[in-house]
């Protein structure tokens, strides 16, 4: 691959320009002056420019929308499981990260597990499947691997099940889409200061200012310093600023410009070793055998997770006439990351001493953990449209679009110097020394530097046809071509160059029956595809000549579900049963990072149940349950057949509820709380490593002193359970213990 950066940059500019031109050509070709309406869009009405107004979210999230042009209509009417974490719930829980928000969605686990260190950040498994590339903000890819803060979040949407038609390559178990805070008409200001245990101090501000009849400016600001409760990790810090500008609010044409600058510097955590007790066939984290939850196997000086994010987004929405709405969404993102971490292992001698005595059990720093830096930049443009029209007696709602994106990922790996003594370091498993300074230098190996470039072009279209007012069919497909180029170089060894070029089609079809606007039943079939080469740089073990020829992973879902809005639309009920089948699954060695085609076929059969909204005007409830029966149905490793799929809890449930006493009086008091529970999960395909169940009991109390001032106290993990927040093949990351925070918020 000659001069890959120059070549791919040229291609990306071409792709970006083509998509941008297509989007604005659609806009320019449509007549101006279309009439708009203030009514909620339905299958018969025009999709209006969406105006984000504080407090305008429906009590029942099923009555809301995704905010994405290519997924029109209410969530109530969409034939797919969509679980929403609304702003009010995140505020009551004092959510600060994406991971904390997703604790409200059962069936989503946080895991990395790709071996060889991988790339740390928001690494999710949705309905049991890796969703590393399935994080979106306002329907556009959020390029880069980092830990996302919630200071710009309006709400978080978990769109479950293969979503290839709407989102492209990946999305085996689903995608996560964050809707961001954008300008609205009118002036408003919100700010909060939170203090808590372990020197936690966080401040946020959110100001909106109307600068014209149809224009507004909004600014969100973040500052935080904190430590993890009941963990011996050092202090971390976060900073962020996010200005946004909108024109044409309330008109037929809306233009929104957004910029995000976000930076953090926090300690890294490689987790605690998993060991197998003599006489047992299943390994568990050492914290299950007497090692204190606070134990951290890292260095105060060198084990850091640092990232800087710059993201620019432009979105255009134009109501052309009473049947056509067009969109053009563009994003340019840059992420710089530096990561160094320690991985502790407990060998046979360590295990023997841990359980049988005979000396101090000594852990060693081995099994990976090479420091690295990454530079990621990407650009995406989606030009799309929604058309509502009739053909004879049939009513249509058609979506169509062109999706082009390019991502460049560069990774530089370092090694620890011989003088650091890291490779020879051994310490007490129960009392590690964290005041260590491990120097590192640029590696001289062939793979010291890696570059992975991915270009994807896709055309998508779907049409929902109403045969009667109650019965409709939604059918669509996406054609995708994806090319990935990989280059590894450095040192005295020869460079490695790989390329993968794949084209595929992802179909979808759904049958929907809506006897009334408040009730619906649906049956869906969909596919999604994950092309090889997407993670060559993030998962170095995948970068081999053999893996370049792997067939794409194919995912198929069958789903039957229903929804109901009751109590005058205040409360939403949802239920679904599904089966997901994965073919051509890959497997990663947790120690070496080697990725290979396992020949596995995996199946997950599940049930999702949900309740969202208000039982009474004062009583809020969000409750969800997920059952997942996972199984490896075929494998080149015969012993793995019939085993549970890694990182998949069979049962998981969440509950959050609150009640406001004495509403509208000086003696008002809101009390609430909830639980998060997940059954045990296996960490490897052989089901020989396991993490036990997790349980967290949380609660809060708040009092509105006046219209401008509110105070709130939150308690987390009040039962002080040992919980694990990230999972690997051979280790697990311990979560915080019992914690308390206090918040003062102003709003006017």
Image (cartoon, rainbow, N blue to C red):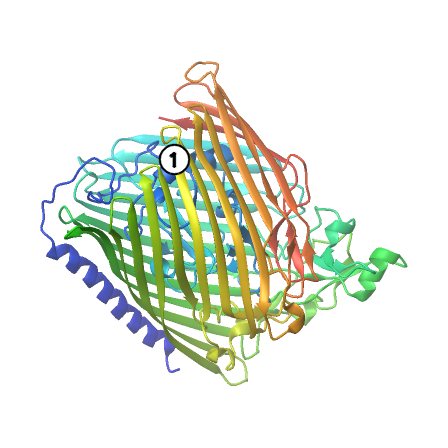
| Residue 556: % across, % down | 44, 63
Q: Nearer the viewer, residue 7 or 115?
A: 115
Q: Nearer the viewer, residue 613 or 124?
A: 613
Name the outermost residue toward the right. Answer: 358
Classify residue 486 by image quadrant: bottom left
Position of 107 relative to 569 (above/below): below
Question: Residue 299, can we see it?
Answer: no
Q: Which residue does the numbered mark 1 point to in the structure image? A: 565
Position of 155 relative to 356 (above/below): above
Label 1 Cα crowd, 10 Å radius (few <14 / some 14-19 / many 20+): many
Image quadrant containing the N terminus:
bottom left
How many discs mark residues in the rendered view?
1
Classify residue 303 by image quadrant: bottom right
Q: Nearer the viewer, residue 351 or 166?
A: 166
At 63% from the left and 57% from the top, the residue drawn is 270
At 23% from the left and 43% from the top, the residue drawn is 49
Q: Nearer the viewer, residue 47 or 17?
A: 47
Name the outermost residue toward the top. Answer: 666
| Residue 732: % across, % down | 65, 55
Classify residue 707 by image quadrant: top left
Task: Name the secondary structure under disc 1.
Answer: strand
At 46% from the left and 76% from the top, the residue drawn is 551
| Residue 241: % across, % down | 39, 45
| Residue 30: % across, % down | 11, 54
Question: Residue 454, can we see it?
Answer: yes
Image quadrant containing the C terminus:
top left
């Amino acid at each position: 691959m000659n001069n890959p950066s120059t070549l791919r940059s040229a291609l990306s500019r071409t792709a970006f320009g083509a998509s941008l031109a297509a989007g604005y050509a659609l806009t320019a070709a449509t007549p101006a002056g279309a009439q708009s309406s203030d009514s909620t869009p339905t299958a018969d009405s025009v999709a209006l420019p969406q105006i984000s107004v504080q407090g305008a979210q429906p009590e029942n999230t099923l009555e809301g929308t995704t905010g994405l042009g290519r997924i029109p209509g209410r969530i109530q009417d969409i034939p797919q499981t969509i679980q929403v974490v609304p702003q009010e719930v995140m505020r009551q829980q004092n959510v600060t990260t994406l991971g904390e928000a997703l604790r409200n969605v059962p069936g989503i686990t946080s895991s990395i597990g790709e071996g060889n260190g991988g790339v740390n950040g928001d690494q999710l498994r949705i309905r049991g499947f890796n969703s590393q590339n399935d994080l979106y903000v306002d329907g556009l890819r959020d390029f880069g691997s980092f830990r996302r803060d919630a200071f710009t979040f309006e709400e978080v949407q978990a769109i479950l099940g293969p979503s290839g038609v709407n989102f492209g390559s990946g999305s085996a178990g689903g995608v996560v889409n964050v809707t961001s805070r954008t300008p609205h008409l009118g002036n408003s200001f919100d700010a909060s200061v939170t203090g808590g245990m372990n020197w936690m101090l966080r401040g946020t501000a959110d100001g909106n200012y109307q600068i014209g009849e149809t224009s507004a400016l909004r600014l969100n600001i973040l500052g935080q310093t904190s430590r993890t409760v009941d963990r011996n990790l050092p202090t971390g810090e976060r900073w962020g600023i996010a200005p946004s500008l909108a024109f044409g609010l309330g008109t037929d044409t809306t233009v929104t410009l957004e910029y995000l600058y976000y930076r953090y510097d926090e300690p890294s955590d490689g987790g605690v070793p998993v060991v197998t007790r003599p006489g047992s066939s299943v390994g568990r984290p050492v914290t299950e055998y007497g090692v204190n939850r606070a134990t951290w196997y890292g260095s105060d000086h060198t084990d850091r997770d640092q990232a800087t994010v710059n993201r620019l987004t432009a979105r255009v929405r134009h109501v052309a006439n009473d049947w056509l709405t067009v969109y053009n969404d563009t994003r340019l993102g840059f992420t710089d990351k530096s990561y160094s971490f320690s991985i502790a292992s407990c060998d046979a001698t360590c295990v023997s001493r841990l359980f049988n005595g005979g000396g101090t059990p000594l852990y060693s720093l081995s099994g990976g953990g090479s420091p690295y830096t990454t530079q990621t930049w990407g650009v995406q443009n989606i030009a799309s449209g929604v058309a509502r029209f009739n053909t004879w007696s049939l009513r249509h709602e058609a979506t169509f679009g062109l999706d082009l994106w390019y991502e460049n990922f560069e990774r530089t790996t370092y090694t620890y110097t011989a003088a650091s003594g890291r490779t020879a370091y051994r310490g007490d498993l129960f009392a590690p020394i964290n005041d260590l300074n491990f120097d590192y230098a640029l590696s001289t190996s062939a793979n010291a530097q890696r570059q992975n470039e991915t270009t994807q072009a896709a055309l998508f279209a779907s049409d929902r046809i109403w045969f009667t007012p109650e019965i409709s069919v939604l059918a669509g497909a996406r054609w995708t071509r994806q090319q990935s180029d990989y280059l590894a170089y450095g040192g005295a060894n020869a460079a490695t160059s790989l390329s993968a070029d794949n084209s595929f089609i992802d179909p979808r079809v759904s049958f929907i029956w809506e006897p009334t606007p408040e009730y619906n039943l649906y049956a869906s079939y969909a596919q999604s595809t994950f092309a090889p080469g997407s993670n060559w740089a993030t998962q170095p073990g995948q970068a081999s000549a053999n893996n370049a020829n792997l067939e794409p992973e194919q995912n198929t879902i069958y789903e039957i579900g229903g929804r109901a809005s009751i109590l005058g639309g205040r409360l939403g009920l949802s239920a679904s049963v599904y089966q997901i089948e994965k073919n051509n699954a890959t497997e990663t060695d947790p120690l070496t990072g080697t990725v290979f085609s396992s020949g596995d076929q995996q199946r997950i059969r599940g049930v999702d149940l949900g309740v969202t909204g208000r039982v009474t005007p004062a009583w809020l409830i969000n409750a969800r349950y997920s059952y997942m029966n996972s199984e490896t149905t075929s494998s080149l490793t015969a012993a793995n057949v019939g085993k549970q799929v890694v990182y998949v809890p069979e049962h998981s449930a969440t509950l959050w509820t609150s009640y406001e006493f004495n509403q509208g009086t000086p003696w008002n008091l809101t009390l609430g709380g909830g639980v998060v529970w997940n059954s045990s999960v296996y960490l490897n395909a052989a089901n020989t490593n396991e993490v036990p169940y997790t349980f967290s009991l949380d609660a809060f109390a708040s009092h509105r002193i006046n219209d401008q001032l509110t105070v709130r106290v939150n308690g987390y993990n009040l039962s002080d359970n040992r919980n694990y927040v990230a999972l690997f093949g051979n280790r697990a990351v311990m979560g915080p213990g019992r914690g308390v925070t206090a918040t003062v918020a102003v709003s006017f």
